[in-house]
């Protein structure tokens, strides 16, 4: 399969060199403040990622799944959501959660292992991370069906990876979205890899082309171009709100880091493609664009860097001082109401562990 | 004898099975070039080729469903599910097809499929990577369920599982992958027919006062408990086969000791311990000096990793149950 960026097959509004590109189908006009904000968000999300990777190395986190290189796809798409909309992220979508107002420490709590959740999805308009590949795509379809039943013009966005398109759940979500004409945008970040499996191993057809068979539009976008990502996502969300049903967006991007901190990518991929993608960096191209058009200057960039430094300190200190959960909190929330069997086990655990404080079990 | 890790023992066992029978093929996510996330299939694609060690699409139902078709075509698929918590998309294929095909076809179609699943906790992993779902499969008629307790058992039973004409769900205790043990690599295919029957439990530590039945990751824990127990002598039995259960070996032991403690990481409710307690009580009612006790995970979803040490049975909890059994 050829490289979609080189082949010019992906929608692009900002070239890797930071030049504005003309596209006959899509365009976007953003104010200077908004453009600066996009840059800031991507820099901050990247900084959280760098810091989290370091914290994992230091043993402060159990695991980390890096979003490095995917900032434009994540921030650009999630930025298009309104407050009543709903996002269903994977474990890698830190730019999505950031854009939905989820705080870095709320995300990091899961990777530290103090919780399997982190926030109230309903209140925040953003589901907790889903680790089981593809599960959340169906949740998104169902949530969108609910919006439709309510007669609201809110919309849903489902995030998943290229690998996830193999799973039954994702394909079933396409069927549900299609059959019920649900207001859902399927946002696939094709970062070229599913752990060690390259995209060539997925399907013979490009991912976005699959949408046609399900009866809704599919679009291929340069996932490292935040302007193009926003343009296509806006359009898809508008269509969903207007009763036009689902869209599949394939954001063509690259996983610049290892799959997770447990992975060793040198076993399956070479450095050459990393070099190609480094030149397509999403942050760098926006920075060049902002500077060239006088939208932001050195002073602004320094200020963002400074803010990132402060955020890094906040993340580091916050993770290190995260309150350890009480052992007996394991029994909380398994059921909606107190449950006799679990209350008994909670009591047993409390008494058993207390027996150690007083010198161990007799 | 060679000292090797359980991971290496499994890798060597898989290699042997592939050398013995050209119909043995491996199928799973990231098992080829990467060698699997735990490297259990390391080097096998290089040595046996991409047609025998296949990287599967990221689809568990697909992996197991395709294995059914491959088995119908005369192959012996050994599939890898990347982690315990990711077997559920395949549950339908396993329960509705793999387990029942032989019966549904009135014995004409066999399902010599091995479904390898790294399982259990204790490695500080994120959600869905530490579960012990063995009871679902042991509950399903038509499936056999095996789990090795040490590298030697892994080396032997993985080959026996592959040679078996019934489908075997093969649970690998992932936190013991890196434990070393002596492995008799000299055993060949003929020997494997003579070495202890994989469907029999193994007495891994003889003792007199309390029988401790365990399997997989808890074998080492219970052996350590036996060593730490100075005044009470523990007989540790590695069940190894969770279905069929070898009740005879347990009965023989409990008739002598009069006490039984069952240990597993999985939750207690409707788990292996419950089945064992019922069967042993039926058989040993007059020999029992105490009720059969269970040391298990609690009846909750596997907790976030910072809490897992409170969830998992450990040496102290085993000894606490032993004391309670002795106190009757
Ligand atoms: C059902 C299921 N099977 C396997 C896994 C193990 N796993 C975690 S991430 C991953 C690859 C996912 O690739 P992709 O969908 O492209 O997302 P990416 O990680 O590249 O963002 C796999 C196989 C899982 N989490 N869930
Ligand atoms: Mg991917």
Image (cartoon, grey):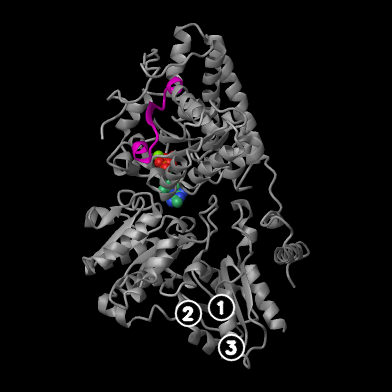
| A359 horizontally vs A123: left or right | right
Q: Earlier in the sequence, mark 3 or mark 2?
A: 2
- Residue sitting at x 71%, y 65%: A345
**How many residues crowd mark 2 within 10 Å: few (<14), some (14–19), many (20+)?**
many
Q: Quadrant of residue A19?
A: top left
- Judging from the image, mark 3 belongs to the subunit labelled B
**Tag 1, which chain?**
B
Q: Is residue B239 above or below residue B254?
A: above
Give the crowd class for mark 3: few <14, some 14-19, many >=20 residues within 10 Å: few
Query: Residue A275 location, x and y as percent?
Result: 33, 27
Against B41, residue A176 (above or below) is: above
Q: Quadrant of ligand 2?
A: top left
Residue designated by label 2: B245
Q: Secondary structure at mark 3?
A: helix
- Left or right: where does residue A219 sit relative to residue B298? left
Sooner in the amino-acid sequence: mark 2 or mark 1: 2
Q: Is residue B292 visible?
A: yes
Quadrant of the drawing holding the C terminus of chain A? bottom right
In this view, which residue lies farthest toward the bottom?
B286
Q: Quadrant of the N terminus of chain A?
A: top left
Query: From where the camera sits, is residue B211 visible?
Result: no
> What residue is shown with label 3?
B282
Q: Which mark is residue B275?
A: 1
Q: Is residue A222 magenta?
A: yes
Q: Are marks 2 and 1 in contact (CB under 8 Å)?
A: yes
Q: CA distance from mark 3 to mark 1?
A: 11 Å
Which numbered marker is on residue A305?
A: none
Instruction: Give the magenta-colored segment's residue range.
Output: A210-228
Q: Is residue A267 above or below residue B153?
A: above
Q: Position of residue B8 (x, y in %)?
A: 36, 61
Marked residue chain, label 2: B
Rendered location of residue A151, percent (x, y): 60, 35
């Amino acid at each position: 399969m050829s490289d979609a960026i080189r082949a010019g097959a992906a929608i692009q509004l900002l070239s890797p060199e930071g030049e504005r590109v003309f596209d006959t189908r899509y365009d976007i006009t953003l104010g200077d403040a908004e453009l600066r904000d996009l840059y800031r968000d991507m820099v901050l999300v990247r900084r959280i990622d760098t810091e989290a990777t370091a914290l994992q190395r230091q043993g402060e986190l159990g695991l980390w799944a890096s979003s490095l290189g995917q900032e434009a796809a994540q921030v650009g798409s999630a930025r298009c959501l309104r407050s009543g909309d709903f996002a269903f992220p994977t474990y890698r979508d830190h730019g999505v959660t950031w854009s939905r107002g989820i705080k870095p420490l709320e995300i990091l709590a899961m990777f530290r292992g103090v919780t399997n959740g982190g926030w109230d999805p309903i209140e925040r308009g953003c589901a907790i991370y889903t680790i089981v590949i593809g599960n959340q795509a169906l949740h998104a379809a169902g949530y969108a069906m609910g919006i439709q039943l309510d007669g609201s013009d809110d919309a849903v966005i489902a995030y998943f990876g290229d690998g996830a398109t193999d799973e039954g759940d994702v394909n079933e979500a396409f069927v549900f979205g299609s059959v019920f004409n649900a207001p859902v945008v399927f946002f696939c970040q094709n970062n070229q890899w599913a752990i060690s499996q390259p995209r060539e191993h997925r399907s013979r057809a490009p991912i976005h082309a699959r949408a046609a068979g399900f009866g809704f539009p599919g679009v291929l976008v340069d996932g490292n171009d935040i302007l193009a990502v926003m343009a296509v996502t806006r359009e898809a969300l508008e269509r969903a709100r207007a009763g036009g049903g689902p869209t599949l967006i394939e954001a063509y991007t690259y996983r610049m880091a290892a799959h997770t901190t447990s992975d060793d990518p040198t076993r399956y991929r070479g450095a050459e493609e990393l070099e190609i993608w480094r030149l397509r960096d999403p942050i760098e191209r926006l920075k060049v664009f902002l500077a060239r058009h006088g939208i932001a200057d050195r002073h602004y960039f320094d200020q963002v860097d400074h803010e990132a430094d402060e955020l890094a300190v906040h993340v580091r200190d916050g993770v290190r001082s995260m309150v350890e959960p009480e052992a007996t909190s394991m029994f909380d929330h398994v059921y909606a109401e107190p449950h006799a069997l679990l209350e008994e086990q909670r009591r047993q655990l409390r008494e058993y562990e207390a027996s150690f404080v007083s010198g161990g079990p007799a | 004898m060679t000292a090797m890790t359980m991971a290496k023992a499994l890798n060597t066992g898989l290699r042997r099975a592939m050398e013995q029978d050209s119909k043995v093929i491996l199928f799973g996510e990231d098992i080829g070039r990467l060698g699997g996330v735990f490297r259990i299939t390391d080097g096998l694609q290089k040595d046996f080729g991409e047609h025998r060690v296949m990287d599967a699409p990221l689809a568990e139902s697909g992996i197991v469903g395709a294995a059914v078709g491959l088995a119908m075509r005369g192959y012996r698929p050994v599939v890898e599910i990347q982690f315990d918590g990711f077997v559920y998309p395949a549950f339908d294929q396993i329960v509705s097809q793999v387990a029942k095909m032989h019966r549904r076809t009135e014995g004409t179609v066999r399902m010599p499929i091995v479904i390898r699943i790294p399982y259990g906790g204790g490695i500080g992993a994120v959600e869905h990577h530490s579960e012990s779902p063995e009871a679902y499969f042991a509950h399903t008629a038509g499936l056999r369920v095996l789990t090795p307790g040490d590298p030697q058992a892994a080396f032997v039973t993985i080959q026996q599982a592959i040679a078996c004409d019934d489908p075997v769900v093969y649970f690998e205790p992932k936190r013991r992958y890196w434990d070393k043990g002596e492995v008799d690599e000299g055993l060949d295919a003929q020997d494997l027919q003579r070495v202890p029957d994989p469907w029999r439990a193994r007495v891994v530590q003889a003792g007199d006062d309390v029988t401790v039945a365990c399997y997989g990751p808890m074998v080492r824990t219970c052996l350590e408990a036996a060593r730490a127990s100075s005044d009470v002598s523990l007989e540790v039995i590695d069940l190894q086969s969770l279905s069929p259960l070898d009740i005879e070996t347990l009965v023989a032991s409990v008739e002598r000791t009069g006490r039984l403690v069952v240990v597993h990481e999985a939750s207690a409710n409707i788990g292996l311990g419950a089945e064992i307690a019922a069967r042993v009580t039926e058989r040993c009612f007059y020999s029992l000096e105490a009720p059969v006790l269970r040391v298990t995970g609690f009846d909750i979803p596997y907790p976030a990793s910072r809490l897992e040490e409170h969830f998992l049975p450990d040496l102290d909890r085993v000894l606490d149950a032993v004391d309670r059994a002795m106190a009757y």
